[in-house]
Image (spheres, rainbow, N blue to C red):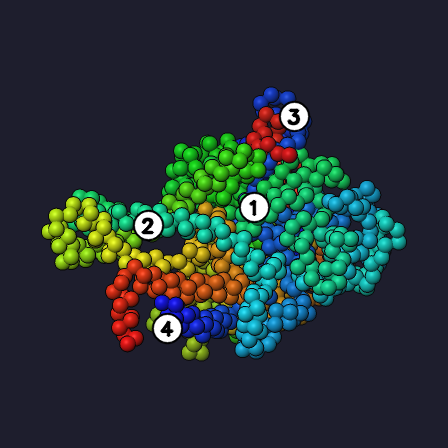
Amino acid sequence: MLPYALRRLILALPLLVGITLISFFLMHLAPGEPVDISNPDATTTADREGRERLIQAYGLDKPIHVQYWNWLTRIVRLDFGRSFAPDARPVLQKIRERLPITLALNVAEMMIIVMLAIPIGVISATRQYSRFDKVTTVFVFVGFATPDFWLALMLMILFGVQLGWLPISGLRSPTWEYLSFWRQQWDFLSHLILPILVATFGGLASFSRYMRQSMLEVVRQDYIQSARAKGLAEPVVIGKHALRNALLPIVTILGLSLPGLIGGSVIIESIFAIPGMGQLMVQAVYERDYPVIMGNLVIVALLTLGANLIADLTYSLVDPRIRVAARRSRR
Amino acid sequence: MSPLGLRHLPLLFVLAVGGCGSEAGSTVDPATGQAAKPTYGDTFIDALTGNISGLIPNVLTDGASFEVGGLIYSGLVNRDKDLNIIGELAESWEFSRDCLDLTFKLRKNVRWHDGKPFTADDVVFTYETMVNPKTPTAYREDFKAVGAVDAPDPYTLHVRYTKPYAKALQSWSIWILPRHVLETYVKEGRLREAPQNRADPIGTGAYRFKEWKPGEKVVLVANQDYFEGRPYLSRIVYRIIPSQATIFLELKAQGIDSAGPAGLTALQFKRQADFPAFRKAYNKYQYQDNVYTYLGFNLGDPRFADKRVRQAFAHAINKRELIEGVRLGLGREATGPYKPGTWAYNPNVRTYPYDMAKARELLAAAGWRTKNADGILVKDGQPFEFVLRTNQGNDERRKVAEIVQASLKDLGVKVDIQVIEWASFLKEYIKKRRFEAIILGWGIGQDPDQFEVWHSSKTGPDDLNRIGYANPEADEMLEKGRMSCVEEERKKYYDRFQEILAEDQPIVFLYFRDALPVVSSRVRGVVPSPNGIRYNFNEWYVPRPLQRYTAG
């Protein structure tokens, strides 16, 4: 187990360098320069002198492979550099202030999806073609097909404007600092309800479908027949013998969605005015803010590699067959 | 074009609409019928579509930062409701007869937000900052004609110009920075990295900085020691809401008091916000914004180098219908780069009324006579077809492009439309002069000097005369216009300049759009003027019974 994990870790290093190398060159292939003014109508320009000074300061005058090398040598010392945006703030600081809210939203979304998708999938599988199965099938496909922004606007109109139950956008009320402690907590939570609802609705479909599919395969297996023949109660057969096996592919999918947890949804963030990672990344791309783009990419790449590793390791933990197979192949 | 122009959108022809607009400006309290006395308190919640990029506007370029910075900092001068230059930190000023010496008398008893006194030395420092080549600013141009700045005493500032510069006075609307706080950063060329660009900026303005949560909000509080008296609204919250649709829903739910300086979209203003509850909760205003939209040509292209072709296009586009189509009528036809109603505007220039026959005639004169099988005009075997490009993220411009495309099709000219993300557009097409025609806009400042945009010396890849316009007489007028500090004299040059542009049609001037702001009806003291509505923001107030938020 341990040597395997170690080997994977060592292999991940060149992979990471490869990812950053390709990203770096791709990013520079996109036309446009960070020193240009982003407003098309502005009739002011930085003078030539000023632009050249900036290009020098950013190191953009050097050949691209030198730029990459400089970036790489800084990043191994965990120096993510400063943003090219006019605020010139450290990249890590910018990411740090955006990350918590995106993470909180995505973790909440993921938990709700898992909690709902597993029962929905199990019930639809065990009662295939029942009314429940049909209704949930329609429901999740509607959810899958509904555009995020449209659903968001509809919910905002209903709960925010018509009923006035929930705030429409943002994270806190403008009067937040004048509220009592518990009112503050509620104020914050109430701002998250609609965005989480919208995000969950869209993500539920695929997960519950995976669960249903995986469960359908398992209940047809011989050992389920034997469990039933042995006289076990149906809930035990499903809940204990079938579910455990059916969850295996779900673990993999969950593992692979880990890196997605830090990438915010641009659409949801813009509509609900949530200052998360998605908006930061898009803004950085528009402004050709290379350090922020690369900083973001490195973190996502690290998480993806890590998540892959964790998924593989847990897979062998929960499924004895894989462990055995691995041992055999090594001999 | 200048910081002043950006800080206070110079706005013309303010119309109060919806019946309640005039009421908003009156000083009579409708509840009691009594003359209301302004009261302190309440929070004003505004919306910005973009995150501010910092807190020292001198090194920034985005509109959101200017909006916030304008309340934190002051300039020596400012513009009043009729766009006249008035003193802000300066009490008075005097020009020498040759326009070369400018002397300011500064206000006494002005204090920075940290309590230190403001003196002429801070102005000298701001000048040094702006001309320091290490300062990454877009406004250095304004100070290039300055020979020397000195402070004979703490409340007198003397500026010596090397040549007369028309924008001299206006250029001193630049945000004045405190020497005692920022000097070390300027010297090291690290003004953008200064902590004051991120938090706790020190200015002399009506509002002090409270907090900035990036991407979420900026909070300002009234400066009790403001030199013109404490402003009435105690607290300003700028919420950052990227989506126009969300802003509108927030307005409907009365979660915000204003849709920001830019206001509503034409569709929202005209249709969606036209119901009784909205009219009761908000006052809507309408005035000419300082941006015009144009159809530009690459004048290096032999087809467009012929002015008859450009004139033909001007005749072929029905501007009235275009404004109706893309702005629902909320805009005004442009005849040149100046707003109707401003002192520099010349109403007596050649115009191009919608006239297809005339357009065909002009094209024929330019050699475009025969049409091929597809109905496209042909000259020397070449069909008249080109690509019209515009920047992504501006739906209005895409629609303008489509209308232009349809209009020119009637003429026998084939137009393909391409919408490109701005950074790529700028780098790949504009800087390399690889475009044929463009739909873009120009923001105009409050001074008529447009040297940067039209002068033939400004055609380098990073310059703004992107179309490559060169007319020696226009150059001369621009040069003379910026060399005088006498308005009547300048008016002559700019009148002639507009005649030349109207004749040449280097671009087809399409329209000035209207700005369509809304302000909560509980806010009083809003007086529409040729300078828009925000020029007297410090005088806005909410009568005590109508105050909605607790504010410190």
Tell whether label 1 touches label 3 (CB within 8 Å). Answer: no
How far is the residue under mark 1 from the one under mark 2?
A: 33 Å
| Identity of the residue drawn at 43% across and 37% down | A166
Q: Amino acid at mark 2?
A: Val
In which quarter of the view is residue B453 placed?
A: bottom right
Tell whether label 3 touches label 2 (CB within 8 Å). Answer: no
User: Of callouts 3 and 1, which one flags the residue occurring earlier in the amino acid sequence?
Assistant: 3
User: Of callouts 4 and 1, which one flags the residue occurring earlier in the amino acid sequence?
Assistant: 1
Residue A13 or residue A196, whichever sits in front: A13
Q: Amino acid at mark 4?
A: Asn
How far is the residue under mark 3 from the one under mark 4?
A: 72 Å
User: Of callouts 3 and 4, which one flags the residue occurring earlier in the amino acid sequence?
Assistant: 3
Q: How many marks?
A: 4
Q: Residue furthest right?
A: B152
Q: Amino acid at mark 1?
A: Lys
Q: Measuring from the top left, give residue B182's x and y in whole percent.
A: 74, 55
How far is the residue under mark 3 from the one under mark 1?
A: 32 Å
In which quarter of the view is residue A226 placed?
A: bottom left
Q: Which residue is mark 3?
A: B36
Q: Nearer the viewer, mark 2 or mark 3?
A: 2
* Res. B309 visible in picture: no
Q: Which residue is mark 2?
A: A114
Left or right placement of residue A9 versus residue B181 in this view: left
How far is the residue under mark 2 from the one under mark 3?
A: 59 Å
Q: Amino acid at mark 3?
A: Ala
How far is the residue under mark 4 from the one under mark 1?
A: 59 Å
Q: Measuring from the top left, give residue A22's x and y in whole percent.
A: 46, 73
Q: Nearer the viewer, mark 1 or mark 2?
A: 2
Q: Which residue is mark 1?
A: B217
Q: Quadrant of the C terminus of chain A?
A: bottom left
Secondary structure at badge 1 equals strand
